[in-house]
Image (tube, grey):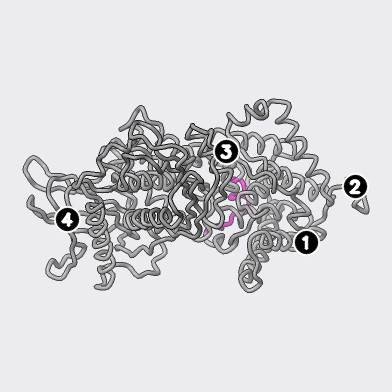
Amino acid sequence: MEQGRRYFAERIRLLHLSRSLLMVGVLWPLSAPAVDTTILNNKSDRPVEIRFQADAADAPRFSLRKGASIPLSVNGSVKLWYSSPGGTGSGILLPNTIYRFVRMESNRMQLERVPLSGLQAKPPRVSEGKLIDREPWPLRIKIAVDDDERTRQSTWENKIKRRINAASRLLEYFCGVRLEVVAITRWESKDSIRDFNLSLREFEQKVPATPARLVIGFTSQYDVKLSRQRLGGTRGPLRSHILIREHGPRISESERLEVLLHELGHYLGAGHSASQRSLMRPVLGDDQSNARSFQLSFDPINLLAMNLVSNQIRQPGFYSIRQIPISVQQRLLDVYNWLAEQQPGDNSALQMARVLCQGVLSRVEVPVPRDDPSPPAVEQRRVQREFQRAVIAILGALGRVADKRDSRSLNRDKLTEAYIRTAAAAAADVGQEHALKAFYYSLAIAFDRGYLIKRYDAVAEKIRKETDLVADASRERFVGDATLWRRASLLQDFISAGILAQFVGSDAARDITTLEEIKQATEPAGFSFAAIVASRAGIRLHQALASREVTFSELATTFTIERFVPSVEAMQKFWTSAELEEDFGGTKGVYFQREIKKIQESVDNLSPFARDDRDRSPR
């Protein structure tokens, strides 16, 4: 591990140097709102001296050795000056872009942009900015070790903690993520399992991630053999579980660290790289990391992907990959296209794109007429203005709840209940002809974080046009940590299904939301019966409000999650297509359809909708 210690020392020195630039006034203040990343890679065979001030005498500088890459946090385009044995020069760095130093045939050093989106693509115009200091973001992790680990707990605990700390130091340098251990546990693995995929599934079922965001498991179920086999695995980027094989007589601690960093790279959006010096090369356990000259490093392409993802998950209130902005998804797709072209036989980049770039891959353009030969009449304009005022009134009421949620200790399910009751009370005070539509449009605007209405692009476009509101700037304050049955994703399913029913009706909404969830069985996210429960409950509430089976005044005083959504406590599993086929005979099978029917019955039998619990029959 001596070469590992030297490497960490040099990386930490560069990190401290980056922070020292702040003290001499080069970096942007800590309060700068936007953080992007530029990757610098030295592809030449010589070190390059770099500075970010025109005055060479006073400017701090650092040396980028051959083959090394460094991420720079920026809030716009920045200018740098460089020098090497091949001469001096300067260049402009754009955010979310990769630049590399190359030595030309004339022996001169040149800085060039890596054209991820095509050789002919022109760089965008970006306002001038500066380097900024990106504070490390804590990723809360749980360590889990299975019952086949034979050493004393103090021994394996200290060993794994050292490895986690070593990985954390590198991740902090490479993408601003610090690993924070918040729990340590053990679990009992089934001795008869000899397949890694089954081990991963068992691990996910037996070890919940709480109270962490990510649980990293170390299994000694079987020995590691240094051959082409899976040394670790996860279901995909930002999934809650990573499992790593631990034991093996020939595997060194530096190789174990390499496997851990590889899987953490996948967690942060990295795909496999064709570079055999990268931590993201497809096959590990090749003895490279035991060499004194080997440097633990990510290739610059994956380094950009990891920073694009880490810059998103550090945003306040981030809870779903569907919140990633379209512009960031497009850049990620550029990265994954590049990786896929370099490795035609490897599908890891495609898998990453399917998860992180859903908005780009599934986007459907909605045609908008250019000319309206018959402008709206005065009465139509008056109705439109009244509707917009109704939406603004409900949003204002939601904003007042958001402003007071900390003082009232509102969070998770209780915060959701406060939001729904408040929106219903506000809807009861607006004109009856606008109440239902304004209620759902307001929830869409307030709660959408890149997933809720953008899941159905045509719906999102219609809401944008009909409300004529620019809500993105104020939406951040609404959501907080609102959940449904303690899961943020279920709240999104509940609201989005109700919004969809507003446009297509209850029957079509049930079909669409079920088909959308079935699609998840082919994705790393997996199919969830709990999501079906939340969607069906959201559709049923819309149906009740539309028919006045439930009034907004009633909803404002009686809404609780327990009253309006069946419990999902027994529905924590996420199913793959193969599992649905094995356990239910597929989604068209009688057993699967029976489960869906049971869910609908549980929704219909909720007390707000049951005939014997009401003063009047539903209309």
Nearer mark to the viewer, of 4 and 2:
2
* Label 4–label 3 contact, CB within 8 A: no
Q: Is residue 499 magenta?
A: no
Q: Which amino acid does label 3 sit on?
A: Gly
* The magenta segment: 460-472
Disc 1 target residue: 556
Q: Which mark is residue 580?
A: none
Mark 3 vs mark 1: in front: 3
Asked if residue 429 is positioned above or below residue 500 in the image, the reply reads below
Disc 1 marks a residue whose amino acid type is Ala
Q: Position of residue 359 (x, y in %)?
A: 50, 42
In primary-sequence order, the first of circles 3 and 2 is 3
The residue drawn where x is 56% and y is 55% is 210
Q: In which quarter of the image is the C terminus?
A: top right
In front: mark 3 or mark 2? 3
- Residue behind mark 4: 90
Among the two numbered marks 3 and 1 on one chain, the one whose residue lies closer to the N terminus: 3
From the image, tell me which residue sits under label 3: 526
Distance from label 4 to label 1 (Cα)?
62 Å
